Image (spheres, helix red, strand yellow):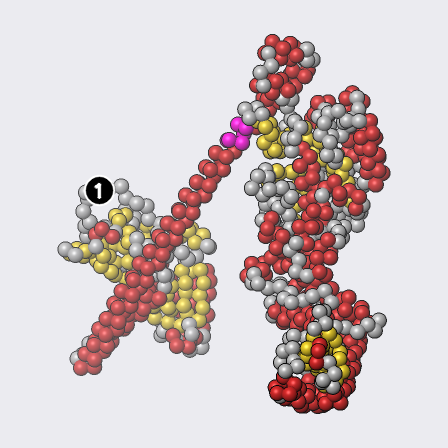
Amino acid sequence: MNLKYFRPLEFNKIRTQLASHASFGASDELARALTPSTDIGEIKTWQQETTEARALLDQQPGLGIGGAREVRPFAQAARIGALLNPTDFLDIRATLLSAKTLRRQLTKLDALYPRLAFIAGGLDDLPALSDAIAKVLNDRGEVVDDASPELARIRRELNVLRARLMDRLQKMITSGEMARWLQEPIITQREGRYVIPIRAEARGRIKGIVHDASASGATLFIEPLAVVEAGNRVRELQIEETREVERILRELTNKVGANADQLDRTVETLAQLDLAFAKAKYSAALKAVEPKVVGTNSGGHPVQGNHTGLPLLLKNARHPLLDPERVVPITVELGRRFSILIITGPNTGGKTVTLKTVGLLALMAQSGLHIPADDGSELPVYQGVYADIGDEQSIEQSLSTFSGHMTNIIEILREASSQSLVLLDELGAGTDPVEGSALARAIITNLLARKISALVATHYAELKAFAHSTPGVENASVEFNLETLAPTYRLTIGLPGRSNAFAIATRLGLDRALVAQARASLAQTDVELEKMLAEIKATQEQVARELSHAQAERENAQRERDAARRKLAEVEQSRAEILKQTRAEADAELQAARAELNRLRQEWRQVALTRDFVERAEEDLHAVEELAQFEPPRREKVEPVELPKSRAIDLGDQVYVPSLDRVGEVTALSADGVDVQMGAFRTRVSTDQIELRAKAQSAQIYETPRGTVILPSGDSPGMEVHLRGMRADEALDKLEKYLDRAYRAGVPYVRIVHGKGTGTLRRLVQEQLTDNPLVVSFQTADNREGGEGVTVAKFASR
């Protein structure tokens, strides 16, 4: 990108604001040098870093690079052999500790923040160098005694000698002989020697070496001869200590130099992470969002959509440098229906702000910054953003200003391509209006032919008509409040700006006759154009109101649908609970039936009951068991009967039981309810839990998967038929009649006991079941229910 065009868009101010959120010099430098990319992969990676960093800081606001410092100058100094200071080493160690901590924190969160974790993986905390610094220096930057054995020996000896020297000097200043010559009884240092202050007139009375004198000359600082030799030894040890400390620091500096490249990379990686955190903080400050970034294919054409240019959509975009409490959001689109937007409106009405907002947000997005707009905003990857925006808003512009603008536009037309965004403010201004309008139209036509996306601000009325009649070009306007005589800064796409000169002049008090005279001098086409614009604006406002009303109605309908779905779910849940309760009651009756059958078996052993009686009881019990295990059919082909509401339930009535979703016959009446027989199953229900149905006809028609069947009505024959010991023709005749009765009674499926034997009867039975239109499927019973001696047949739904 040509950085020349960043200045009119004030991108430098964005970088300065971003840098204010950086934590140390290296990331501050990156923020101030931030440049938009033209590679979609790189842009999306940067956007991902910003998004992850913002999500992370929302969860852990205190996370950051800690005590990291810009230590690359120290690494460079060590690289060329310069001796580092203790504080330099402390900054290096703090930076390495920060790198270690940040790497540990982010790599643990790689599932949530993969991009940040990947960057943090490149941090090298150089543990050997960090430990070496910690071994040599304490937190105050002092070389510790244990930095080397030699330093420890020197300091031990020095401490002993210094203590002895101080002890001898202390005895001197407290002795009566010397005390009278002292200026004050203290021990001090001059030029690294231990001295005592004496009065000037005592000179010669105390033998020693004078190292200094006070400014007035009244005090001499003398080192007594008695301690000169001890002082010399102390001084020698001090020099040895200094040399050993320097040797240790030199050795440590060499280690820094040996790791200078790794140290540089660690600082650069920390700076990259801190830049991501700075972008995240800036995003939060602007209440910004990640835009959708659209790239281009190898042919240079937009990846998606059939539009005349690169697709751009900014929803409620806000200029990032304006007061967020006062800035007016704008919605701008390009590249779908049109590639050039011509914006008209009054001076100071927001045209220039609109151009700068679009251009600035494009640069921000391609720099990995979130943009101050609503979710759903979409920006393409521009290979260049070109802006000719001047600060001069006066109509009276000099020839040199016009020349300057034309020079910029010529350069822009030479460099721009279909992958560019061009922003032209007050195109054609500063010269004769007729010529300026013609030039503006020619420039816009050139941009349109080359499919270059552009926003153009202008005052020329001719361009309004040009945009209205030219495909690929669209009008837009910034509103002006005639009541307050102030711009609203709202952008309206599809409607050109109206001329407000007459209205403003009238409201300011100009004689209405003069205004009328001026209006009359306008061409009829201009008057009709202004009238048309007013009508279009009124229509748009009406459509907006109706759209808002329709939206409210749609939301209300959605709420009602949601309420209906919840009610249906409640009904289904209630039905399921009723079925569960009914099955529980059926289980209870089943247990009672089993107990009764056991009692009959006991009596049979004691009295001469017929075996047939017990077999029928067992068949009935088996039928109850089968019905208790199966969900009843959901639909009955019985039409409702038209009866007076006052009609009482009577014996023989056909009734519908909603809780079971079954139809049955009333077999008994009592004060607490009625008994309803449903096939082989009978239950008692209250009269308010049933509904009357028409009685079944003597013959009923049923549709099955194999055709139409006409059956007479009848009672249930049970759910099992025994064919063992019968001849084939006799068994098949009995089976056919039994199947008819069982289907009519509503039995879901039956057991056919034919025995094992040679298997002939079983084969004949299953062949008849195959041809029977009432049977939808059959299978051999499992071993617990008779195995190959029993076939289970399932009926078609009624």
Q: Quadrant of residue 473?
A: top right
Residue 76: tell me if it is visible. Answer: yes
Q: Is residue 226 above or below residue 436?
A: below
**Badge 1 amino acid:** Lys
Q: Quadrant of residue 510?
A: top right
Query: What's the residue at 45%, 43% (across, down)?
Result: 558
* Residue 599 left/right relative to 104: left
- The residue range painted magenta reads 541-546
Q: Quadrant of residue 21?
A: bottom right
Front one among 221 and 254: 221
Q: Is residue 209 above or below residue 415?
A: below
Disc 1 crowd rating (10 Å Cα; few below 14, some 14-19, many 20+) is few
Q: Secondary structure at mark 1?
A: loop
Q: Quadrant of the C terminus?
A: bottom left
Q: Residue 237 at what x, y percent from top left? A: 75, 86
Q: Is residue 334 magenta?
A: no
Callout count: 1
Q: Residue 750 at what x, y percent from top left? A: 37, 65
Label 1 sits on residue: 645
Q: Residue 87 at what x, y percent from top left? A: 70, 71
**In the displayed image of the protein, which residue is found farthest to the left?**
671
Front one among 760 and 784: 784
